[in-house]
Image: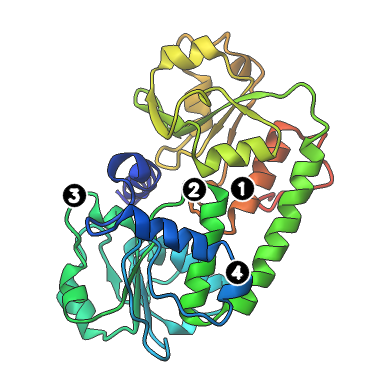
Amino acid sequence: MKLKKTFSLLLALLLLAALIGCAPAETTTENAQLQTEETQQPQETEDIRPDMDRSGNPITLPDEVDSIISMAPSATQTLLDLGLKDKIIAVDTYSAMYFDLEELPTFDMMEPDTEQMALLDADLIFTTGMSAVGGADPFKPLRDIGVCIADIPSASSIENMLEDVRFIAACVGAQEACEKQIDAFQKELDLLKSLSAGIENKKRVEVEIACAPDIYTIGNNTFMQEMLTAIGAENIFADQDGYLAVSEEAVVTLNPDVILTMVDYIDDPVGEILGRTGWENVTAVANKAVYLVNTNAVSLPNLHVIDGMKQMAKLIYPDVYSEIEDPFAA
């Protein structure tokens, strides 16, 4: 059951942009664009506290943020990266599971107990648009009593992701540490891009979010597509946008050179792909170029996607990236 819930979270996060536009009902396009423009200028925001969340909703941060509830795994991991574990007083159930925070009070991301949450008297609550998949904002009762709720939609690009990380840091006064981490991220990304620049015969890749018979994959205008591009790989579904349901026939016809699976809810996802009837002549299957990648590192939009890119790069082009260390190597 836990593995199925993990998959449900992942799939919902990845499909969020396509399904609901990633924003609560009161968000305006003008406000969201303004917030994006502001966060693209980190040198000007170092000492400025945000007055708008990443969905474009106005927020009023307290003078000091000493207690935080995080209802989004990507935000939780960013807070941990910034050394703020001691300020996290509660998390969503998935954050608790992913990051060994099960000693903290936990709340269901989809149906949070806002009465119990209010009793914790948090200075700040980070949320994700996933909680509003049903159309209603479950945190409205907390907004109505003056709790500071900062919503962060699922990022659709690496640039959006960096803006989100900077926003979290600005909310909690950790801009200096954040910029150092982003600088390190950028250097590693630049190195991967420089190595990929020499790749002439690019391999064609399929990424599986969910396995057969209900295959889900990635298309264009997703941060995962950017990850593939950065390491010199071609997505076989790059001519379509967002996160996609595709047929087995479509994958077989497009004949990928490599298949990457992030499925974590069955015992042997690689074996499942290799054993599919009618896939014997797919290049990736025939060459056994089917690999399991770290689910969190390629799906949670924060600075850890660099580890996902390193892993994918070494799996797809082991010779090109021979000097890059695989962060998940045994």
- Tag 1 or tag 2, which sits nearer the N-term? 2
Mark-to-mark CA distance, 2 and 4: 25 Å
Outermost residue to the bottom: 63
Q: Which residue is mark 1?
A: 308
How many callouts does the rendering have? 4
- In x, y percent, where is residue 167? 49, 69
Left of 281 or right of it: where is 144?
A: left
Kindly identify the amino acid type of the residue bearing the numbered disc 2. Answer: Ser
- Tag 2 or tag 3, which sits nearer the N-term? 3
- Tag 1 or tag 4, which sits nearer the N-term? 4
Q: Are marks 2 and 1 in contact (CB under 8 Å)?
A: yes
Of marks 3 and 2, the one in the foreground: 3
Mark-to-mark CA distance, 4 and 1: 25 Å
Is there any visible trace of residue 98 in the rendered image? no
Q: Are marks 2 and 4 in contact (CB under 8 Å)?
A: no
Is there any visible trace of residue 52 in the rendered image? yes
* Residue 299, numbered label: 2
Q: Secondary structure at mark 2?
A: helix
Residue 122 occupies which quadrant of the picture?
A: bottom left
Of marks 2 and 4, the one in the foreground: 4
- Tag 4 or tag 2, which sits nearer the N-term? 4
Mark-to-mark CA distance, 3 and 2: 22 Å
Q: Is residue 214 above or below residue 330?
A: above
Left of 1 or right of it: where is 306?
A: right
* Residue 212, numbered label: none
Left of 215 or right of it: where is 85?
A: right
Mark-to-mark CA distance, 2 and 1: 9 Å
Of marks 3 and 1, the one in the foreground: 3
**Residue under the image location 39 percent in, 18 percent down:** 247
Kindly identify the amino acid type of the residue bearing the numbered disc 1. Answer: Gly
* Residue 42, numbered label: 4
